Amino acid sequence: MQEEYDLLGGIDNSVFDSPGTFAEDAFGGEAQEKKDTGWISVASSMIAAMRYIGAEGNMYVRFPNGAEYVYSTPENVFREMLNAPSIGSYFRRNVYTRYRYSRR
């Protein structure tokens, strides 16, 4: 079972208990079913929402135009970005050029 980081800092496994949308693994692995929930809306002109799935070690980022990308990051990067004074600036400096990513 996969784990998902929730807004309160805990782990919420319930979002994966029932089938959801069919999505390809972030880096070309087998396809698997995932429920499209657990997104945290953020106050940023650059990023609309984000979430972290600990079992995968992936941070999901949704941009205002609806595009979604998956970044292979440690959980502390997700937490730091979520709490940064400027989420967009943190993303550009600490995520975009440093971690492997793919479009979802």
Image (spheres, grey):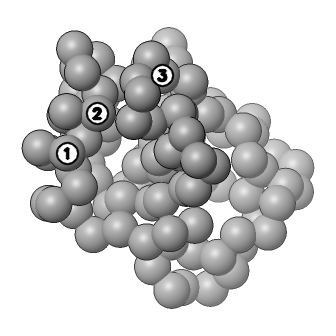
At horizontal 35% and vertical 68% (from top left) the residue drawn is 101
Q: What residue type is disc 1 on?
A: Arg
How many numbered marks appear? 3
Say which label, 3 or 2, has the lower sequence index.
3
Estimate the x, y position of residue 20 in percent, counting from the top left.
84, 55
The residue nearer to you, when weighing 3 against 40, is: 40
Estimate the x, y position of residue 5 in percent, counting from the top left.
50, 33
Image quarter in which the C terminus is found: bottom right
Distance in Å between CA atoms under marks 1 and 2: 6 Å
Q: Does residue 76 show up?
A: no
Q: Which residue bears the numbered disc 2?
A: 88
Q: For this view, does 16 lie left or right of residue 61?
A: right
Image quarter in which the N terminus is found: bottom right
Classify mark 3: helix, strand or loop: loop
Q: Which residue bears the numbered disc 1?
A: 92
For residue 51, above or below residue 97: above
Distance in Å between CA atoms under marks 3 and 2: 10 Å
Q: For this view, does 86 lie left or right of residue 93?
A: right
Characterize the local packing of mark 2: few (<14), some (14-19) or many (20 or more) Cα atoms within 10 angstroms. some
